[in-house]
Amino acid sequence: MRKLIVLCLVLTACQETPSETPVQAVAPPNDDLRFVGGYRATDDECQLTGETAFTIDFLDDAADLVSCPTGSDAAQSLVDMYSARQMAETGGYTVYSVPRR
């Protein structure tokens, strides 16, 4: 039994723990947008967008509201991959409605 415990301790000590890199929030360009976080990944240029006075009319319970830098490859891939519909533009960002499947 002691050998098993020692073996478990040795194996646990040998395991690498993934380094956690801090997620840097992207600052919204103005008060029109409130970014919640990266849409497809934490470092995605396209940001899940929360409710503001500007976005309230675009919110839909069957879709995500996502903002991408206007004209970026990330914006184009959002349209191509998820059939995102353009809703508005503000501060260098285009706001899209992305249907939930």
Image (spheres, rainbow, N blue to C red):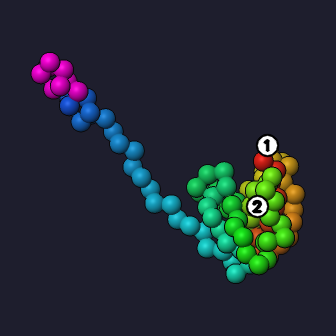
Magenta extent: 1-8
Give whichever of 22, 76 is nearer the camera: 22
Identify the mark at residue 65; answer none if there is no mark.
2
For disc 1, the marked residue is: 101
Q: Is mark 2 on a helix, strand or loop?
A: strand
Residue depicted at 77% across the width and 78% down the height: 53
What is the chief secondary structure element of the magenta stretch?
A: helix
The amino acid type found where label 1 is placed reads: Arg
- Tell me the quarter of the picture where residue 37 sits: bottom right
Q: Where is residue 45 in the image (x, y as percent from the top left)?
A: 67, 60
Q: Let me know if residue 2 is in the magenta part.
A: yes
Pointer 2 or 1: first along the chain: 2
Would residue 36 appear left or right of 100 to someone viewing this image?
Answer: left
Q: Let me know if residue 13 is in the magenta part.
A: no
Looking at the rendered structure, the number of numbered marks drawn on it comes to: 2
Residue density around tag 1, few if under 14, some if 14–19, many if 20 or more, within 10 Å: few
- Tell me the quarter of the picture where residue 30 sits: bottom right
Q: In which quarter of the image is the C terminus?
A: top right
Residue depicted at 24% across the width and 36% down the height: 13
Farthest residue to the bottom: give it: 31
Q: Is mark 1 on a helix, strand or loop?
A: loop
Residue 21: in sight, yes or no?
yes
Residue depicted at 78% across the width and 72% down the height: 55
Residue density around tag 2, few if under 14, some if 14–19, many if 20 or more, within 10 Å: many
Q: Where is residue 51 in the image (x, y as percent from the top left)?
A: 72, 70
Q: Where is residue 79 in the image (x, y as percent from the top left)?
A: 83, 52
